[in-house]
Amino acid sequence: MSSARPAASVWWHEEAGLEAECSPLAADRSADVVIVGGGYCGLWTALALKEREPGLDVLVLERAFCGDGPSGRNGGFLHGYWSSLPWLAQTFGDEAALAIARASTGAVGAVRALGEDVWLREAGMLKVSAALAQDAAVERSIAEAERLGVPEEAVAAEAMHFRRAVFFRDGATVQPARLVQALRRAALAAGVSIHERTPVLRVEPVVVTAGGRVRASEIVLATGRPPLPRNLTQFSSYVVLTEPVPELLEEMGWAQGEAIVDSRMFLHYFRTTAEGRVLMGSGSGPIGPYRHDAASIARAERGVRRLLPALAGARITHAWGGPIDVSADRFPFVGTLPGGVRYAAGFSGNGVGPSWLAGQILASLVMGRSDGWTALPLLDRGPRRPLPPEPLKRLGGRAVRAAVLRVEEAEEDGRRPSALVRAVAAIPRILRIQIGVR
C-alpha cells in the first residue's frame, strides 16, 4: 500500500509536548564543570557528578533545546552491549568484553530509578534473521555467549515468521523525548544549571558563547562530535511510524513490546508504542549531515511491508531522521583531548543505554577517580581502527554503502549480486571496520 506523504516532524516531541525552555546564557560566569550538549550523554554526566558530589557547580549549555538532536529522534531502544558480544570480544578481548557488557546493564535500572513515565517496557530484544545470509549472525551471537560462559544473555528463540532469532534479556524500549525531559527535570532538581538556545562558538580554554563566557575547572564535550576525524564518520538513520494497529499486533503475537532488529549490516530496527503504533527504522541513510532523505525513508517503509507483511495496509503517519556519528568499530570513545577537555562520542546509533555508561566514566574522569568506570577500555583507547583520511573516507564510504545495500537487497530477494559488488561490500570486513551489525 502506498502511504500519503507523512509528516516530517519528530512524533516523539509531539507526543511528549513542549516544556518551558531554560533561558540562554546572558553573562559571563564560572562553574566547576561546564558540559557542552544537553542530550542523554550530557545530562547523565551532569546527574552522575551531582550524585557523587552534590556541592559541585555543574553547568550544561545546549545549542537548541535538550533532546533536539539524536537524543530526541532515535528509535527508543534501551540496551547495553550483550547483543554486540561477538564484535566486543574481537575488539577488546574476552575479559574486557564481559566487563563492558556487564557495566552497560545498569542503564535500564537508571532509567527506571528516574521514577517517571517514559514508556519504559522491559520486554527484551530479539535479533532476527530475515534472509539466509543473516542466519550466521544470529547463530554467532548464541555461540559467543556460550563460549564466554554467559548463555543466559543470548538465548535461541522464535519470533513470528522469521528464520532464526536470539533473545537478549537486557533490552527495553522508551519514549526518547520523554526520557530526555525526565533527565532534564532530574538535573534541574539536583541543582544543575542549564542554558538552552546557547550555541558554543569555541573552547579556548574558556567556553565562548554569543551571550557570555564560562570559565570552568573541567570542560566536557557531550555533543557527539569532538575533533576526532580519523575515528568517526557520519551516517544517518531514518524511521517511519504507522497508525495505531493494536489488533494486528495481537494477531502477530507481538503484543508484549519486544524490541526487534534484523541481521543486515545496515539493520532494520522496529518496536511498538504504548498505543499500538509500529516504528520501523533503517540505519542505511547517506553519509553526511542530512536531515531528510526520501530514499532512506522509502527504504524504512519497505521494511515495514516486507518484514511485517501483516502491516501491508497500515498507513504511515510520520517519518523523520538525521545524522549519527559512527566509529570504525561501532563502540564509543571516552577520553581527554589535548588541553584537558573531556569528551564522549561515537555511539553509532546505540546511545540511549551506553550514554548512561559514558556519563559514569566521564564523571569519574572529571573527578580524578580511578575506579571500575575508568578501568573500562572505552576510556582513552585511542584510534584503535582509524578510518581513512578525507576525501577517501567520504568517497570510499559512499561506494561501500551503495555496494552493501545492493548486496543485502539481493540476498533478501534470493538473488546473487555480482562479483564486483560483493568485492566492494567486503572492503570493511577486510579492513576490520564495523560499519554495520554483521
Image (cartoon, rainbow, N blue to C red):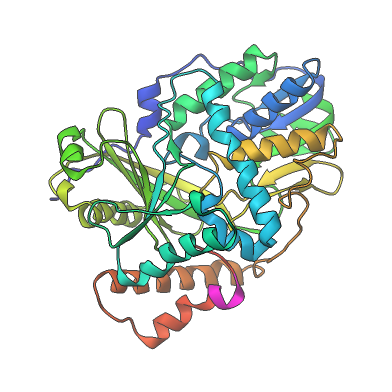
Q: Is residue 430 magenta?
A: yes
Residue 149 occupies quadrant = bottom right
Percent position (x, y) of residue 303? 27, 55
Q: Residue at x 51, y 49 (%)?
A: 349
Percent position (x, y) of residue 257? 33, 37
State whether residue 236 appears in this view.
yes
Q: Residue furthest bottom?
A: 419
Compared with residue 19, is residue 78 higher up or lower down, i.e. above or below? below
Q: Nearer the viewer, residue 239 or 170?
A: 170
State whether residue 405 appears in this view.
no
Q: Residue at x 46, y 60 (%)?
A: 142
Task: Say whether residue 265 is left or right of residue 348.
Answer: left
Q: Is residue 32 magenta?
A: no
Q: Which residues are magenta?
A: 428-432
Compared with residue 244, is residue 299 higher up or lower down, i.e. above or below? below
Most common secondary structure along the magenta stretch: helix
Percent position (x, y) of residue 53? 79, 20
Q: Residue at x 61, y 31 (%)?
A: 63
Residue 254 occupies quadrant = top left
Q: Nearer the viewer, residue 84 or 145?
A: 145
The total of numbered circles placed on residues is: 0
Task: Say whether residue 20 is left or right of residue 90.
Answer: left
Percent position (x, y) of residue 147? 57, 63
Q: Nearer the viewer, residue 215 or 271?
A: 271
Task: Say whether residue 109 is left or right of residue 320.
Answer: right
